[in-house]
Image (spheres, rainbow, N blue to C red):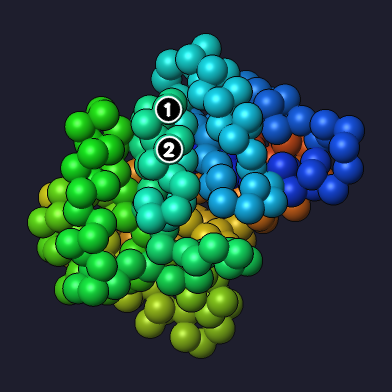
Amino acid sequence: MTALSVNLNKVALVRNTRNLGIPSVMRLAQIALEAGADGITVHPRPDARHIRALDVHELAALMKAWPACEFNIEGNPFHNLMDFVRAVRPHQCTFVPDETGQATSDHGWDLARDGERVRPFIEEARALGVRVSLFMDPSPEAMSLARALGADRIELYTEPYAQLFGTGAQSAELARYKAAAEAALASGLGVNAGHDLNRDNLAPFLATVPGVREVSIGHALTADALEFGMSRTVGLYLAEIRKAGAGR
């Protein structure tokens, strides 16, 4: 079954608006794991506007008590990501080509342009025993290059799908992701997915796109947790993942 990794960036963003330490990133991580989440994701940006360096180290320590679950750290290897990879050696690092100060990730890697610059960081992370995933647009032709650079997985950037979900263009957009996933699998890559996935669009995506090993969900999941609580929300997302599996 596709693994659910809970992204805690927005929890940290709310906490950082006051100097009170609430909501607690650590406590929400623990609740998510107790509820059945398969992992925790964080994206510590250089400006520390949400996840901070201390969060990364505390979460790494917490994850030691959950050996069946994975810690995924996202970020740009040209900025601050590799410092965290070297320090805590997460199970997975996801290389994302975002710019300093960018509001959120909004495109995948152009490997024809940046691949050789990224290659040494892929090699270093893998030498440290860390799985490497590259954040990618659904472009089938790019998958063999991602594999040639040494990546273990790709994470499909799913905002374009989310924007077209429920419209007449949904089927055609899903076909793009299906083709990209098939190309990744044929190249020997694992497939992850994330960005703007939610309880409505998650199951249709997973039922169509083959071989998705992990979804990383933050914004929508955090919004749902405000309404339902973190524990129940994790259960609701796991139910959508099971629904997708039953529909295949």
Secondary structure at badge 1 equals helix
Q: Are marks 2 and 1 in contact (CB under 8 Å)?
A: yes
Query: Label 2 sits on what residue type?
Result: Asp
- Residue drawn at x 54%, y 47% as measured from the top left: 43
Using the image as rendered, state which of residue 108 and residue 226 is in the foreground: 108
- Residue drawn at x 50%, y 66% as measured from the top left: 99
* Label 1: few (<14), some (14–19) or many (≥20) C-alpha neighbours in 10 Å: few
Residue 129 placement, left or right of 203: left
Q: How many labels does the image show?
A: 2
Residue 191 placement, left or right of 167: left
> In x, y percent, where is residue 69?
45, 25
**Residue 177 appears anywhere in the view:** no
User: Residue at label 1?
Assistant: 87
> In x, y percent, where is residue 67?
43, 16
Secondary structure at badge 2 equals helix
Please tell me in which quadrant of the rendered image residue 139 appears. bottom left
As drawn, which residue projects farthest toward the bottom? 168
User: Residue at label 2?
Assistant: 83
- Residue drawn at x 42%, y 20% as measured from the top left: 68
Using the image as rendered, state which of residue 85 and residue 180 is in the foreground: 85
> In x, y percent, where is residue 3?
43, 38
Q: How far, Cα to Cα, is label 2 from label 1?
A: 6 Å
Query: Label 1 sits on what residue type?
Result: Ala
Q: In this view, does 93 lie above or below 248?
A: above
Please tell me in which quadrant of the rendered image residue 167 appears. bottom right
